[in-house]
Image (spheres, rainbow, N blue to C red):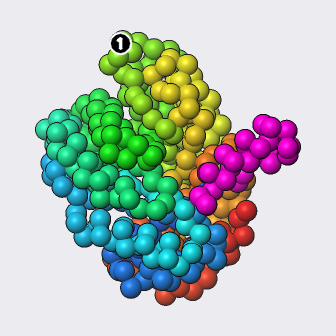
Amino acid sequence: MPRNRTVLTLAAVAAAGLVPATSASAAPLKGLQDQEMTVNFPDMVPEFLDAAETAKVEMVRFNTRWDGKSSKPDGGQITGIRQFVQQAVASDSGITAIEVVPTVTGGSSFNPKGKKPGPTASSKISVKAYSAYVQELATALRDLPVDRFYSALNEPNWYRHIPKRGNAAMYRRLHNTAYTQIKRIDPEAKVLFGELLPYARRLSKNYPNGQSENAGSFVREVLGLKSNWKAKGSRKTYTVKADGVSLHTYDFKANPRKKRKDRDDWTQANLGYAKSDLRKAARTKRLPSKAVSNLYLTEFAYKTRGSDKIPVGRAASYLKSAWSIAEKQKVKSFLWYQLRDPQTSGELWQSGLQTRSGGSRATWRAFVGLR
C-alpha cells in the first residue's frame, strides 16, 4: 500500500480515538532520481532497484525532454518510465510513487550571453503545444500502479528553461494548463506548483541580465504579490490551482543549518522562511492552502566533482542534518539527485551517493540510514 494512503488510514483511526494522534505522523517519503540508471540505460534498472530497496526508497523522479514547441513527448522516455515502474512493482521494491517533470532543453538560445535582454518567453514557448504534450504524457502514464505526481516544468525560475522576459506569466499559464489537463485525464494524479531552484545565480560580465531568480521573489511574481506578500492586481489573473508545492533546496557548500540572509533564497536552511511565506501567499487565496501544507523537496544533493564539491564525510554529515530539517518542517518527500555518478565522463553534474561503478560512499551509507 502506498505510504500516503497508510498515513491517511492511521489519521482516521487516530481521529476515532483508537490510537494516539501522533501515530499519524511520518518521516518524509525518501526519494531518488537517476535518469541514466532508470531510463537511459535500462540494463541498470535491477541495480537501481536493489539499491532503492536497501535504502527504503519510495518515490522516484523522472525528467522528460521538451523543446518548448513540440506537442509530443519523447516516446523512448515514456517507454522507459513505464518499463521501470513495471519492473519496480514486479520486484516488490517498495517504490510506491513517481514524479514526472518536463524539462525545457532551450539552453543558451533562451538566455544568451551579453547585454541584450534576450528573447521573450512567448517567442520560445508554445502553450498550445505544451497542452498537447502534457495531455499525451498523462494519458501514457495514467494506468501505472503507483501514485503519480507531476510538476508543470523543471526549475522555471532558471532563464534557460523560461526566458527572463515574461517568465513568471508564462510559468503561471503552463502550470494551470498542466493542472487542468492532467486532472481531466488522470484525476487521481497530484500536480505540484514550483519545482523551484533556490536562489538567483550571480550576475556576471557574461550574464549582466542574470541567469535565474530566487524562489521567493519568483513566486510573488507568479501570484501577483507585493514584497510584503500582499495581493495586487486581479485574483482571477494570478490564481493557480495545485495539490502541493515542490522545491529544490540545494546549497552546495553551506551547512544546511546556516540560514541565508535573503529569506527569498529557499535553501534547506531557509525552509522555515519558505513555509512561512508560502502561508502568506495562501492567505491571498491565489495559492491553495492545501498546497502549502503539502511541501515536497524533489531535488537535493551534494556534488562529488567540480567547484561545488565538498569532502564526502562532510557531505554525509550535512545530509543527516538536512534530513532532520525536512522532518522538523514536516515535508512530504526528500529526494536525492543521482544514485551513481554518471556513466558519461563528460557530464558536468555529478552528485552520486555511489561511485560510477557502484562503490559505496559515506553519503550512501548516511542515506540508507535515514529514517
Q: Is residue 43 visible?
A: yes
Q: Please name whichever residue, 323 or 75, is drawn nearer the observer in this view of the structure.
A: 75
Image quadrant containing the C terminus: bottom right
In this rendering, position of residue 296 left or right of residue 108? right
Residue 152 part of the magenta-drawn span: no
In this rendering, position of residue 205 left or right of residue 334? left
Residue at x 70%, y 54% (from the top left corner): 27
In this rendering, position of residue 290 left or right of residue 102? right
Image quadrant in which you'd find residue 204: top left
Q: Is residue 108 visible?
A: no
Q: Please name whichever residue, 82 or 299, is drawn nearer the observer in this view of the structure.
A: 82
Picture layout, residue 273 above or below residue 42: above
Residue 12 part of the magenta-drawn span: yes
Q: Position of residue 159 (x, y in %)?
A: 30, 44
Picture layout, residue 333 above or below residue 226: below
Residue at x 61%, y 51% (from the top left corner): 4
Label 1: few (<14), some (14–19) or many (≥20) C-alpha neighbours in 10 Å: few
Span colored in magenta: 1-27
Image quadrant in which you'd find residue 290: top right
In this rendering, position of residue 125 left or right of residue 322? left
Residue at mark 1: 234
Q: Position of residue 69 (x, y in %)?
A: 15, 48
Q: Element type at marker 1?
A: loop
Q: Position of residue 122 (x, y in %)?
A: 17, 35
Image quadrant containing the N terminus: bottom right
